[in-house]
Image (cartoon, helix red, strand yellow):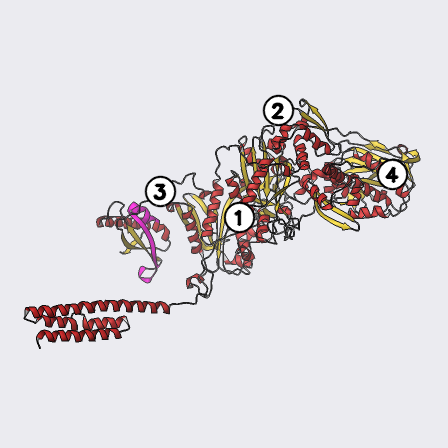
Amino acid sequence: MPGHSLGHWNLDIGISLVILVWSFGFNDMLVPLTWLREYIDIDVPTSELAERLSLAGMEVEGIEKAGNDEVLNIAITPDAARCLSVIGVAREVAAILGKSIKLPPDEFPAGGEERADQLVDVSIEDPNLCQRYIGVVVKGVQIRESPAWMKDRLERAGVRAVNNVVDVTNYVMLEWGQPLHAFDYQKLKSRAGSEKPKVIVRPAKSGEKMKTLDAAERNLNPSMLMICDSRGPIAVAGVMGGADSEVSSQTRDILIEAATFDKTSVRRTAQKLKMSTESSFRFTRGIPSRLPEIAARRAAKLIAELGGGNIAAGIVDQYPVPQEAVTVYLTASQVKRTLGVELSLDEIAKTLSRLEFVIENRASVPSDAGAGAMALFADPKEDVLKCAVPWYRLDVRIPADLTEEIARLRGFDSIGMTQLSEPLGRPHRNLINETEEKLRDILVGCGFQETINYSLTTPQMHEKLGLASESTKYVTLANAMSVDRTVMRRSMIVSAIEGLAYNARFAERLATFEVGRIYLPEQSEDGIRPKEDRRVSLLMCGARRTVNFNSDPSGTEEMDFFDLKGVIESLLARAGVKEDRIRFESHRQPGTFTPRCARVMIGEKELGVFGEINPAILRELGIKSNRVAVAELRITPLIPGEWDWSRSTTVNKFPAVIEDLAFVVEENIGAGTLRRAIVRTGGQRVVDVELFDVFRGPALGAGKKSLAFRVSYQDANAAIANEEVVSLREKIVQAIASEFGGVLRAV
Amino acid sequence: MSEVADILKAAEALNIEARESLARISDVAGVAAWHAEYLSKKGKIPALLKSVGAIKEIEAKKQAGKAGNELNQALKAAFEAKQEEMKAQELAAKLSAESVDVTLPGRLMPLGKIHPSTATIREICGILNHLGFEIYEAPEVETDEYNFQLLNMPPDHPARDMWDTFYTTTPGLILRTHTSPGQIHAMRALAPQPIRIISAGKCFRFEEVTARSESMFHQIEGIAVGHNITFADLKGTLMSFVDQFFGVGRKLRFRKSYFPFTEPSVEVDITCTLCNGKGCSVCKQSGWLEVLGAGMVHPTVLKNGGYDPSVFSGFAFGMGPERLTMLKYRIDDIRYFFSNDARFLKQF
């Protein structure tokens, strides 16, 4: 069946165009060319016709041979619902080729003695939900197979032939675009007992039930619009008929329904019932109220023609909301301002009349033009076109719609190419984006592969990694597609480990990073959207270098905490963070990390946490590696100011005095902490302090260690004097003694 | 025979002896030994010179001295030349011993790379930056209002069917299905200034993950709003972009399409990057590849963004970096992008 399911538009290369921005599967209409030629004389080759239709908005996705016929497969955009019909497409072809169409003759050969209004009553409860309802009765019909010509056309258009009555309703729907329904009139009559059958269009009542044509028992509720009789529902309005009034081989008398239902109501009803039919699809796109009458008369004529029988005189027509005539205004300057093309009013009028717009010239736009003049650009001195919109064009309501008609009919090729020329105001920098880009460059320079992971994961992954508890809040999907992707991540580490789990089977070494966002609903800034915090994650696992026969032996060692720390230090240095603002603190998070874990601070702000993942977790996730070092860092603390105030320093040409200082301290004193103290105490003339040895031994005593530093003293203005070195060393030794109880071991 | 004659004779003999001896030497150590024998303080030449010093007669002493010195200089020069020669010879031998099988594997430095989606986004943004478009980033978890309503899709608008949406358990909060809500955010932040904005980022759709469709992907959206911006400006901008991204010489084709937030709306094709328009399997024999969606910003959307649509106009366009990357590298399965298979990523 064409239509009703979202088709996907694929290229051979295998890319769904859903991935292309703003593009999606539109619905297909299958149009047999022989059928189309009944209304329009086509004198161009099919391939040319297809191309011109495509450029004008009726994308021909394929041309299929069917016997001596060809079938165009046309993707119909939501605004072109009028082309979900052969006549709709014929009108397009006529406009494109500059021809006029021949509509089928409007014949209504009523022959019976009875009048339709003696046979059935119609009542509409809410005109907002049903703008028009027409009933036509044909009596004495013989149900049989349709003739070959009709079956062929239906089949080529993708509709299965059933019997002459059902086929006619489908045929007229495909021809004119008006969904129809045929009831077995006798069944309605027997339901009504002695009364005249009455069709009531009303919302379902709570608890009502109905069996639809597909034999499913439907539970109804008041949000659904139904066709009912005195006994209850007989059809779901605009969606599907009921089994109780279905046309069968015994049927003799037919009630044809042709109606205009509110598109939103049909949409909601179809969604609630999870039903989507050719009929509901067309109603949700909009059916002009002028159409049911044409379609009802056409269907009655065809049924009488194919099944014999008599058409009851007249039609029952409830038409509480007549279709409004729509007028839209257009000016030459509006066309120029939108399309950039200079066209005379006359040229514009000619183009629009090919589309059956009725055009008049006016001196100005009337004040009550409303939407018809929305955002219209009009020079007070220029003439205005008053364009009467054809009744079947529900998509044209404002001047912008008319400019599209002009562009597509004249061809977008006819529009020139110009460059934007309006001066812009002051530029806006995007510092967060700049920072993210810089981090990517730094990490690529450190030999890391960038990854982009799914933002969707599960609470269980967070919990397994010790990154959340059962009460943690997430942005949670109401309609998850898979059990593995139910919530938006709150941690980049979750994604990094998922990537590792995927790659662990075949990658011996991974050094990956991801720049992305985590989603924190409890920190919402506007009360509805979650906070989307920018983060970067790092993951290192496996050998330090890619191992081969010729490897440097140290490259075969497993990467660990200190490899990752080195990367973070490089990253911070390259990102321009001053070394004296960076602090690494021991951090315990046993649910996630081993004791090889640290928190990084920049000044008083936490940058993030990194460490080696607890191997028990890795085993649980089926990851064989024992040592996996992971970091998650915030990006905002790394955003530089608008201007980098750091200055270079002149290379100091005066000699430095370099000496080694080893301090014996308690085991719990960090080497970095001690080093910071030396740097701080030494001041400007201590230009470099480098740890070169850590030593433990019986000579030092239990619980003690020796930390040896190479200290460089240098003066910017002269060779540093020996007395100065001595005095600086004294200061350092005293500070270490008083702050940490450290004892100088050797000079 | 005078004393002088003896010395001269001895010098000549020494000269011949020394030179013959030097000629036989074949390494640096030999040259050093030769130096010790003849030219060092205790060597034969200084001894000869000493015997010259013993001559009493002035003229004779002068004559012998000259000959002795000449011999000394000549042998020194010979020594130096030989020493250079032997050093060069030894170095060459040493280097030759170090020659390797150049086809053995090198010691690899870890090579970092950016993700192919990022690479494409960077390239696109770079080109558009030069055309004056600034980067504006918008939320990924979005409201129904921004994702649909303000983009001219009120509740129950049939066009909503075009996007299969992930809803969250918070009513009205969804995962954005496209980057277009960024248009509204950017306009509201910057109206009534003229703007040129690009917004790239993750989008989500309720889609089965298959080789051809993904539930997460990136989009890049561009919007320009100002006075008198026309469709011709859109064409010119896109042509500049296509020239730079796909290479000069591609043709552009605009087909009327439908997006609720633009009017007119078009889809943009370029001549196929593989067959250059002749027709091949990539372009389904059509010669064209669809690469962009675009249009003039709908007056309602301009109004929702804070611009008076009777004064301002604008255009917008959007594209999918994964699709462009797939076209560029002929990648046949979109799932590669976010499974982060190291074997896939290392190719870029």
Determine the CA span between mark 2 and mark 1: 47 Å
Q: Amino acid at mark 4?
A: Lys
* Marked residue chain, label 3: A
Q: Which residues are magenta?
A: A676-702
User: If you read the primary sequence from the N terminus, does the residue marked by circle 4 or circle 2 appear first?
Assistant: 4
Where disc 3 sits, the SS reads loop
Determine crowd level at label 4: few under 14, some 14-19, many 20+ residues with C-alpha closer than 10 A: many
Which residue does the image show at 34% across and 68% down from the upper left? B92
Give the number of the mark in front: 2 or 1. 2
A292 vs A239, nearest the viewer: A292
Q: Which residue is mark 1?
A: B118
Determine the CA span between mark 2 and mark 3: 59 Å
Determine the CA span between mark 3 and mark 4: 91 Å
Residue at the far bottom in the pictured view: B1
Q: Which residue is mark 4?
A: A301
Determine crowd level at label 1: few under 14, some 14-19, many 20+ residues with C-alpha closer than 10 A: many
Q: Amino acid at mark 1?
A: Thr
* Marked residue chain, label 4: A
Circles 4, 1 touching at the beta carbon (< 8 Å):
no
Where disc 1 sits, the SS reads helix
Q: Percent x, y for residue A160?
A: 81, 48
Q: Which residue is mark 3?
A: A647
Q: Which residue is mark 2?
A: A379
A715 vs A583, nearest the viewer: A715
* Marked residue chain, label 2: A
